């Protein structure tokens, strides 16, 4: 079956530091890949997505590239802010039913 | 659009009581998902519907849990009887297949359930 593995947190950074959160997946076909973000006390929000190999998703300074050869979709941001403190979820969608398979989430804490 | 609406936002109840959580998906979306989030188990898909029909309920933990979608704009998740281990945040999400944002799920703010 499908699965998503992402690095465990928490990840603690200083403001303006570089952020990388690793995500790898297992899927039988050609999934779409997502990063969702959950701010404290809120639901999940779509951060970015990529639907085919070598696509790069980007939003709010975050980027992730769909790497089929390494089955990865690592999230990066060049300079984080305190407001980026949240839990980040990597996910994939393969079936026509839009069913998402989520990773375990990575908590990121950015200190001033 | 108002987004996915869930009610109540917080629910505190006693063990053995019936709990009903409600969800209004985004208008025009034909998929609806119920998730549960806990520290121990993370984010779990409980059940999802397509065009008001349950497609996969394999994530429903036991018979105490039931979900319905009587029409395209309303769904309920019911727990009867509730137990302390049901304490969690329950999210509803919706999506629309075949449109520009296909396979993107939009989440509601969640219902925080505490069973004493």
Image (cartoon, rainbow, N blue to C red):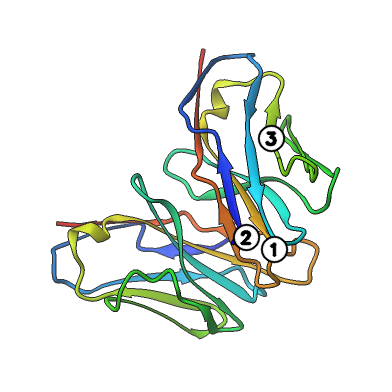
Look at 13% across and 65% down and name the residue there: B15
Same-subunit check for callouts 2 and 1: no
Determine the secondary structure under disc 2.
loop
* Residue A74 - label: 3
| Residue under the point 49% across and 50% down | A43
Q: Nearer the viewer, mark 2 or mark 3?
A: 3
Task: Give x and y (percent) for residue B22.
Answer: 40, 71
Residue B104 percent coordinates (x, y): 68, 59
Q: Quadrant of the N terminus of chain B?
A: bottom right
| Mark 2 and mark 1: Cα distance apart in space | 13 Å
The relative height of residue A107 versus residue A24 in the rendered view (above or below) is above
Which sits in the foreground, A66 or B94? A66
Quadrant location of residue A101? bottom right
Classify mark 1: helix, strand or loop: loop
Residue placed under numbered mark 2 in the picture: B105
Looking at the rendered structure, whether the residues under marks 2 and 3 are on a common chain is answered as no
Mark 3 or mark 1, earlier in chain: 3
Q: Is residue B41 left or right of residue A64?
A: left
Residue under the image location 19 percent in, 74 percent down:
B81
B17 sits left or right of A99 in the view: left
* Percent coordinates x, y for residue B67 in the rendering: 40, 78
For residue A94, which numbered disc appears in the image?
1
**Figure quadrant of the C terminus of chain B:** bottom left
Categorize mark 1 by other alpha carbons within 10 Å: few (<14), some (14-19), many (20+).
some
Chain letter of the residue beneath label 2 in the structure image: B
Judging from the image, mark 1 belongs to the subunit labelled A
Q: Is residue A21 above or below residue A1?
A: above
Q: Alpha-carbon distance for marks 2 and 3? A: 20 Å
Q: Which mark is residue A17?
A: none
């Amino acid at each position: 079956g499908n699965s998503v593995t992402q690095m465990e947190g928490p990840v603690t950074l200083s403001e303006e530091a570089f952020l990388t959160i690793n995500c790898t997946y297992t899927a039988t076909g050609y999934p779409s890949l997502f990063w969702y973000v959950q701010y404290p006390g809120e639901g999940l929000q779509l951060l970015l997505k990529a639907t085919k190999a070598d696509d790069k998703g980007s939003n709010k300074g975050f980027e992730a590239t769909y790497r089929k050869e390494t089955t990865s979709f690592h999230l990066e941001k060049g300079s984080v802010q305190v407001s980026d403190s949240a839990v980040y979820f990597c996910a994939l969608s393969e079936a026509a039913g839009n069913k998402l398979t989520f990773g375990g989430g990575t908590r990121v804490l950015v200190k001033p | 659009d108002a987004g996915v609406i869930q009610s109540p936002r917080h629910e505190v109840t006693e063990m053995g009581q019936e709990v009903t959580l409600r969800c209004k998906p985004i208008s025009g979306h034909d998929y609806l998902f119920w998730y549960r989030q806990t520290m121990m188990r993370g984010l779990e898909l409980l059940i999802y519907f397509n065009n008001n029909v349950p497609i996969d309920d394999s994530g429903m933990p036991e018979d105490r849990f039931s979900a319905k979608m009587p029409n395209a704009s309303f769904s309920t998740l019911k727990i009867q009887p509730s137990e302390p281990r049901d304490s969690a945040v329950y999210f509803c999400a919706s999506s629309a297949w075949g449109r520009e944002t296909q396979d993107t799920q939009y989440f509601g703010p969640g219902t925080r359930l505490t069973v004493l």
